Image: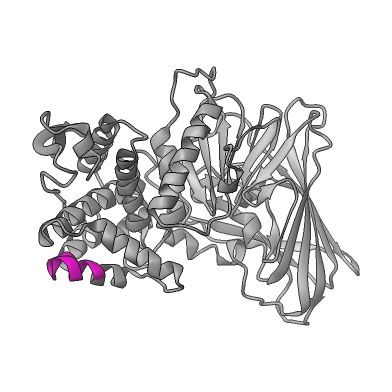
Amino acid sequence: MKWFWLLQAALTSVTAFANPVIDSLGAVSPLTIDVILRPVRGDSAEVTAVEVRWRLNGTLRPTSLPFSLIAPITYAGRTGIADRVDSLYARDSSGLISFTIEDDPKDPGGFPYFRHWRAQRRVVPPIVVSYCMLSIRGPSTPGPQFDFLSYNGGISSGGMALFVLPESIAVKNTRLRWDLSDLSPGPIAASTNGEGDFELPIGTEELVQAYYMAGPLGRYAPADTLTGFRAYWLGQPAFDPRREMAWTSLVYEYLRHFYQDTTTLSYRVFLRAYPGTGGGTALRNSFMLGTAPGSGDSAKTGPRGTLAHEMGHMWIGELSGGGPGGTTWFNEGLNVYYTRLLLLRSGLAPVSDYENDINKRARDYYTNPFKNVSADSIRKLGFSTGVGSRSAQNVPYSRGSMYFADVDAKVRAATGGRRKLDDVILALFERRRNGEEITQQKLLDALVNEIGPAARKEFEAVIIRGETIMPESGAFGPGFERRSLKIAGEGQEVDGFEWVRVPSIPDSRCREW
């Protein structure tokens, strides 16, 4: 199972924390923030918490709004984050700052909602805040890889599970420094923003939407250091992480080439081997993979489909402006579609992997009890029905990927094979790189231009209303034909389809699709 942070419904509720660009308090002079992260062990062999200390410098304009701090209580199904904040202390030029605490209403879909610490008086920078963020104890649970975990003498976390930050203040410069003095000798610290300390000429949103890892980390960098690809891992997975990260770097380069990216300067992969974790989650220029601990067997492969899928989010991105039910059907559905197709074309995975993924997604789709639920209802359900293949949260992945396979087949048929979905998508991505916002409407206009008015009707029926889709027999290439199938669902068999390999079609022709 995979998750992507750009869930449209989630983003509508995290602006003040993840993207605090509204300067509600009003800065007279540019505000800067200096942050120190110090993993602490105390008398334990493992890290028990991260001590966080930050100093906000600058001048605030007098305002009726109270100065406040913010942290999520729940973030994309990850719960109890604000409850793990311990020993919060704040002072300014006048002394100790006292707070009242206010919690947002609980979001039943598991999307982000927040705790606010509101100052009881006007504050005057410099403002110093310190606290301990306690780590999760015991096994993790499946879901987005944001939790703050400590194990194997180190830590791994998403920024949203580490930081209590100023609310509604536009910080102009952010500096972060690591203090690794309480870890065993020779630790490495890395994040989405680089290895070791870093400085960013931008606000605190870059702290939140980033991954962090520190401790006795494994590290992989390709011989060609100009690629910007780096990988880090904490703990020992079942497979050889160095070998799998070398494979991942090849996929990264293939994806960059396909998506015509000449600008990406860095990309970082974080791998944590911890009980209960599973799947991957992408953030900006990075992703975290969770996997069970193991022996590091060089004969075993890692979850390569997940590795490729999470990197694909780097270029798939999102549609601007949302739409009915958000755009997860695009973010995830298109990425599922292209992950398996580009692995097929690249030769970095066997043709059998392509066939297996098609049929897994088909089974997930046809047996999902929420498959005919509208996009808007799927968005509202969110994480409330779980995160597995039979959950509402999984529908945009399987429904979207089946939809794009069908659209591709229709584009090829309408143009006599002269054009395909690649031509539509890559042209839209080029427009986006040139500064144009790509919306749902612009995507549909492009599809109508290729297929005709039926393209809009199919989108509204399948994606918006949730009507069952049945891709054509050749929707996945000439090497696979559709067959009807009874599939075991929840307590009963359901009608569905599978795509079976045509023996007379060689692998080489399959890869040309």
Question: Where does the N terminus fall, quadrant-wise?
Answer: top left
Q: Quadrant of residue 96?
A: bottom right
Q: Position of residue 64 (x, y in %)?
A: 72, 81
Q: Which residue is at the front of the view, 411 or 168?
A: 411
Instruction: Work out whether 77 lies above or below 149.
Output: below
In the image, 254: left or right of 157?
A: left
Q: In the image, is residue 452 part of the stretch drawn in magenta?
A: yes
Q: Quadrant of residue 376?
A: bottom left
Magenta stretch: includes residue 25 = no
Residue 169 left/right relative to 341: right
Residue range corresponding to the magenta coloring: 446-455
Frontmost residue, 314 versus 169:
314
Q: Is residue 486 visible?
A: yes
Residue at (45% x, 18% y) in the render: 299
Q: Quadrant of the C terminus?
A: top left
Can you give x and y, in whole percent of width and height, for residue 60 in the image? 78, 77
Q: Nearer the viewer, residue 506 or 150?
A: 506
Answer whether residue 383 is visible to the viewer in this image: no
Residue pictured at 34% horizontal, 66% vertical: 428
Q: Is residue 498 above or below residue 513?
A: above
Magenta-colored segment: predominant secondary structure:
helix
- In the displayed structure, 58 sits above or below 241; it is below
- Whether residue 3 sits left or right of residue 98 in the image: it is left
Residue 48 location (% of width, % of height): 73, 34
Residue 108 % position (x, y): 44, 54
Q: Residue at x 50, y 17 (%)?
A: 297
Rendered position, 140 above or below 15: above
